[in-house]
Amino acid sequence: MEIESSRRITKSEIAAIAGRILKSDSCKKDLWRLVHSENRHVGVNALWILTYLCNSEKEWMASLQNEIIDLLLSETDVSKKRMMLQILRHQEFSKEYIRTDFLDFCLSKICSECEPYAVRAYCIHIAFKMCRYYSELLGELEERLEMMSFQALSPGLASSRRATMAAIERARKINNF
């Protein structure tokens, strides 16, 4: 694959590579292998392509959910974290199986001013997807979101906060919490 070089690939190259990957299971396996590359550019390029496959390859991407979470929990590169969270944001989380290590990760990043706005916003959305089934967890998420009101927020992060607060209210009504 041409993403194995150390240069950043373009959007048009991503579209072409994504089109080829859709046609071959072996290409998907190769792409996933490249995510783990020691070369940062290769790993970032592979993740960038995966973000383009979120909607068209939902089943395959869902099968990678635990592996993506495992990578994310130990990742220090901000670009890789952001893209992994972007991929996970497109996925569903089961009521019966919530990874508490991942939920704790998301909750801890929400108010962390050391994290980029995009990471924080994705963590808000993903935390809601995991918490929405449980009154206690919704309460904990709501507390984190309320703490954010004392911070300077970007317009996007403020929007994520408002939308999630509204979604919490709807979830409480639906679930009679």
Image (cartoon, helix red, strand yellow):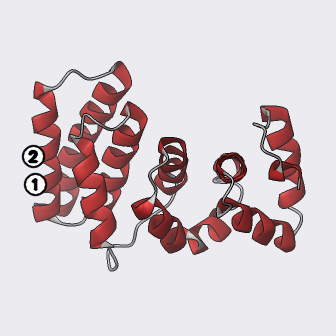
Say which mark, if any, is on residue 143.
2
Q: Position of residue 92 (x, y in %)?
A: 46, 63
Relative placement, left or right, of 39 versus 140 is right
Q: Residues within 10 Å of mark 2 (few under 14, many from 20)?
A: few
Identify the image quadrant of residue 161: top left
| Residue contact at pointers 2 and 1, CB within 8 angstroms | yes
Front-lying residue, 4 or 64: 4
Q: Residues within 10 Å of mark 1 (few under 14, many from 20)?
A: some
Say which mark, if any, is on residue 30.
none
The amino acid beneath tag 2 is Glu
Which quarter of the image is occupied by the N terminus? bottom right
Q: Measuring 30% from the left and 54% from the top, which residue is drawn there?
A: 106
Q: Measuring 22% from the left and 57% from the top, which residue is drawn there?
A: 174
Examine the rendering and report whether any part of residue 176 can be seen.
Answer: no
Front-lying residue, 161 or 66: 66
Front-lying residue, 33 or 87: 33
Mark 2–mark 1 distance (CA, rounded to whole Å) = 6 Å
Which quarter of the image is occupied by the C terminus? bottom left
Q: Measuring 11% from the left and 37% from the top, which residue is drawn there?
A: 146
Q: Measuring 77% from the left and 71% from the top, which residue is drawn there?
A: 29
Q: Position of residue 43 (x, y in %)?
A: 67, 53
The amino acid beneath tag 1 is Gly
In the displayed image of the protein, which residue is found farthest to the bottom?
A: 96
**Residue receiving disc 1:** 139
Examine the rendering and report whether any part of residue 37 can be seen.
Answer: yes
Q: Secondary structure at mark 1?
A: helix
Q: Position of residue 37 (x, y in %)?
A: 68, 61
Q: Position of residue 80 (x, y in %)?
A: 54, 48
